[in-house]
Amino acid sequence: MKNYFQFEKLGTNYRREFIGGLTTFLSMAYILIVNPLTLSLESIPDLPDSMRMDSGAVFVATALAGAIGSLIMGLIAKYPIALAPGVGLNAFFAYTVILTMEIPWQSALTGVLFSGIIFILLTLTGLREQIINSIPVELKLAVGAGIGLFITFIGFQNAGIIINNDAVLVGLGDLTNGNTLLAIFGIFITVILMTKGVKGGIFFGMLITAVLGMIVGLIDIPSKVIGAVPSLEPTFGAALDPLFNNPSDLFTVQMLVVVLTFLFVDFFDTAGTLVAVANQANLMKDNKLPRAGKALFADSCATVVGAILGTSTTTSYIESSAGVAAGARTGFASVVTAGLFLLALLFSPLLEVITAPVTAPALIIVGVLMVSALGKIDWEKFEIAVPAFLTIIAMPLTYSIATGIAIGFIFYPITMIMKGRGKEIHPIMYLLFVIFTLYFIFLV
C-alpha cells in the first residue's frame, strides 16, 4: 500500500493521510445535508410533489456518489482530492432547471448524465488534459490564489462574520451572535495550532470547536449515533427514464443550454480545483499535472454514476485543500474520505454536529495557505498582472470559480498580443478565448 501510493517519495504516512482524508470529509460533509434540501426544493412552499426529488434518496445518492467518485480518484489518479455533488451546480439544477425552466427532475438528471458521458469522451481523447496543460503557469497560480480568496469568503459567510448588505453588497455581521462567536473561537484555536506547527491542526481545530459548541448549547448533541439508511429507489435510474419514455423532450434548445452549462461549469471548476490542490501539495511537475487524464476520468465517471444514482453533477471539491493542509499528499486520503462517506450512511445523526461555524475556520485558514501562490506571479509584467488579477478577484466577487477563469482567460491573449508576445500563447488558449467570449454573449 505504501509503495502503491508512494508514501516515502511524497514524505507522508498513514496517520497524515488518514487525518487529511478525515479533515477533507468533515470540511465537505455539509453536502450530505445541503444537497437533499436543495434538490427537494425544501425552501420553496406549495410545489407539487412531482417537482420535488425524494430527500432521503438524494441523501443516499449523495453519499454513494461521493464515496465512488473519491475512491476512483484515490485509486486510479492517486490524488488527495475528494468528490461529491457540487454546491453551485445543485442550485442551478434545482432552482434554474427544475423551478424556472420547469424541466422534470428526471430529465435534468438525464442532462447531467449526458454531460458526464461527453466529459468521458473528451477525457479519453486527451482533449481535457491538453487544455489544462496548455494553461500558462501564471494563470494556474492565479486560479489557485483566486480559489483561496473564494473559499475564505465562503468561510466568512458561513461564520456570519460577513453578511449581505443591500447598500454596499457586503458588510460586517453581528459579532455578538453565538454561532459567529463560536466560529471566531474556531479561527483563533486553529491559527494557534497551525502556528505551533501541530500536524492536523485544521482537523483538531474543527474537533475542539464542535465540542465547545455542544458544551455551550450552540450545537445539539446527537440523540442517537446510528440511523436507518433511506431507500434509493425513488431516484435510482430515473435519469434513464426520459430516454425510453419521452426522448423528444430531451432534444430541445432548453436541454441543450442545460447540458452546456453543466459541461462548462464542471469542466473549469474541476480544472481549477485540480490545479489549485496539486499546486498546494507540490504535485505539479514542469507546469503540468501528472496523471491529469486519470484525474479527469475519475471526475467524469463520478458525474455519470451520480446521475444514475440520482443527484446533480458530482465534481472535485476545493475543500480537499483542507485535507492537504492537514497533511494529505496521496490518493490514500481520498480512499479514507470515500470510506467515511459510506459510514455516513449509517452514522448520519453525527453529521448534525458538523455545522457551518465548525467548518468555517477550516475554509478561512485554507484560504490563507492557498494565496501564497500570489508571490510566484510576476506582477512587474503588466500583460501577466492584468489577467492574473482579474482571475483572482472575479472568483469571490462573482461567486464562481468558472467565471473567474473565463474572465482571466479572455484578457490573457489580449494583453499578450498587445505586448507582442502572441507567439508564446498555446493555440488552445486562443480557442478558449473564443469559447469564453461566446459563453458570456449567449449563455450568461
Image: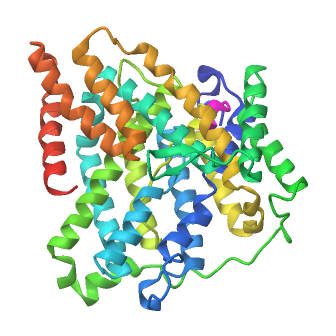
| Residue drawn at the location 54% of the way across and 77% of the way down | 42
Numbered label tally: 0
Q: Which residues are magenta?
A: 322-328
Q: Position of residue 349 (x, y in %)?
A: 76, 68
Q: Please tell me whether residue 327 belongs to the stretch shown in magenta.
A: yes
Residue 345 in view here: yes
Q: Is residue 339 left or right of residue 377?
A: right
Q: Which picture quadrant has residue 415?
A: top left
Residue 212, horizontal then vertical, whole percent = 86, 48
Q: Nearer the viewer, residue 393 or 335?
A: 393
| Residue drawn at 65 percent across, 47 percent down | 159
In the visual, does 224 lie left or right of 153?
right
Which residue is found at the position 66% from the left and 30% from the top?
327
User: Where is residue 346 drawn, in percent x and y?
Assistant: 73, 69
User: On the picture, is 51 further left or further right than 64?
Assistant: left
Q: State whether residue 142 is above or below residue 185.
A: above
Determine which quarter of the picture holds residue 109. Answer: bottom left
Give the farthest residue toward the top: 380
